[in-house]
Image (cartoon, rainbow, N blue to C red):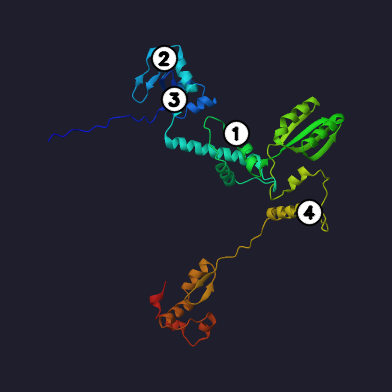
Amino acid sequence: MSKKLLQPIGQKRLTNVAVVRLKKHGNRFEIACYPNKVLSWRSGVEKDLDEVLQSQTVYSNVSKGVLAKSKELIAAFGTDDQSKICLEILNKGELQVAGKERESQLSSQFRDIATIVMQKTINPETQRPYTISMIERLMHEIHFAVDPHSSSKKQALEVIRELQKQFPIKRAPMRIRLTVPENTSSSLVEKLNAWEATITARDTSGTNMAQVCEIEPGFFRDCDILVRNLQGRMEILAVSVHFEGDTHVDDIADHVDLQPSLPTKDSTDPIAQLSEKVQKQTISSTAPKKVAVEPKQNQCSTCNAVVGDAKEYREHFKSDWHKHNLKRKTRNLPPLTADECSAADVDLGDSRADLKDYSF
């Protein structure tokens, strides 16, 4: 019986090649690129074409190494210039990725979209943002599908519009500072009231009036055009304003235009009490703490007594008191204190001969 060597045949897997494919005029054209370089080229990060293409050659099948015919290139692209055709395929073609890699990219982009939605929205009842897990659950409920060819920010805005139709959610307001001449501030205030903006602070300096307000992001462009027409300027202080649970003294100072005053002990103002509490915590945290360092005490288990430091501990083991208690311990007798040992009718000098074996 003859034995044949079985060799694997079929498609050859390319591990270090990213294939970009474009179908045109019924023919398939492919180019070989470096991994992770195609997306960098399309996003504008990579500018050098040689860093993206492994070779400026057009294939009909990269894995088998079959080159595209010149007649097919002229019929599809109108030219047989390999460089121009590679550039068109690179910009318009479809990047071939594995199933797990595509799933990982979609999952990562889904997470990015949910994060953007969380940062730009709040609960209208509590004025606080939703958690990332709740945003993802709501996105699954509206059957949102990620488009890999669209940006995450654009898709996040579409998700917000869809969520507003079914769930209690709204865009987080923007905090901006508007500075206009004082004689035109009345028209600005009327517009802000029409847009239901919240004015948190006002300040007049010379002939100009500055107002800090929170406005819906949808009115941002209209507000910008209005301020320019009034010959003023606009500054963005915060893109998204969220109401946090723990209020800080600096945040209160930003929202309330009050003259600073020293808090008194009998003051019932919560702002004064909060500032006094923060001041006490700061003083207590910065005050140096004095810790008394006690010397380490050693205990002799044979004599059941506490001895001093390490030097005294070593001298104690050489003393007659410790040797006598060591002899009593071998006879299952309780230990004696130093006074009892000196007052007892025991001649320690005579017992030295018997305790030579215990000398150190």
Q: Nearer the viewer, residue 240 or 190?
A: 190
Q: Nearer the viewer, mark 1 or mark 4?
A: 1
Amino acid type of the residue tagged 2 in the rendering: Leu
- Residue 302 on image: x %, y %: 47, 76
Q: Earlier in the sequence, mark 4 or mark 3?
A: 3
Disc 4 versus disc 2: nearer the observer? 2
Measured in 3D between alpha carbons, the distance from the residue under mark 1 to the one under mark 2, in whole angstroms, is: 38 Å
Residue 73's disc is 2
Residue at position x 48%, y 69% in the image:
314
- How far apart are the two marked residues, 4 and 2, measured between alpha carbons? 78 Å
Say which mark, if any, is on residue 270.
Answer: 4
Q: Secondary structure under badge 1? A: helix
**Mark 1 or mark 2: which comes first in sequence?**
2
Give the position of the N terminus as an image quadrant. top left
Q: CA distance from mark 3 to mark 1?
A: 26 Å
Q: Which residue is mark 1?
A: 153
Q: Position of residue 240 (x, y in %)?
A: 68, 39
Residue picked out by circle 3? 20
Residue 209 vs residue 54: left or right? right
Q: Quarter of the image containing the C terminus?
A: bottom left
Q: Earlier in the sequence, mark 4 or mark 2?
A: 2
Quarter-of-image position of residue 192: top right
The CA distance from mark 4 to mark 3 is 64 Å
The image position of residue 274, as x and y in percent, is 75, 53
Q: Amino acid at mark 1?
A: Lys
Is the residue under label 3 in contact with that under label 4 (CB below 8 Å)? no
Mark 3 or mark 1: which comes first in sequence?
Answer: 3
Q: In terms of depth relative to the viewer, which is nearer, 344 or 24? A: 24
Badge 4 crowding class, 10 Å Cα cut-off, few under 14, some 14 to 19, many 20 or more, is few
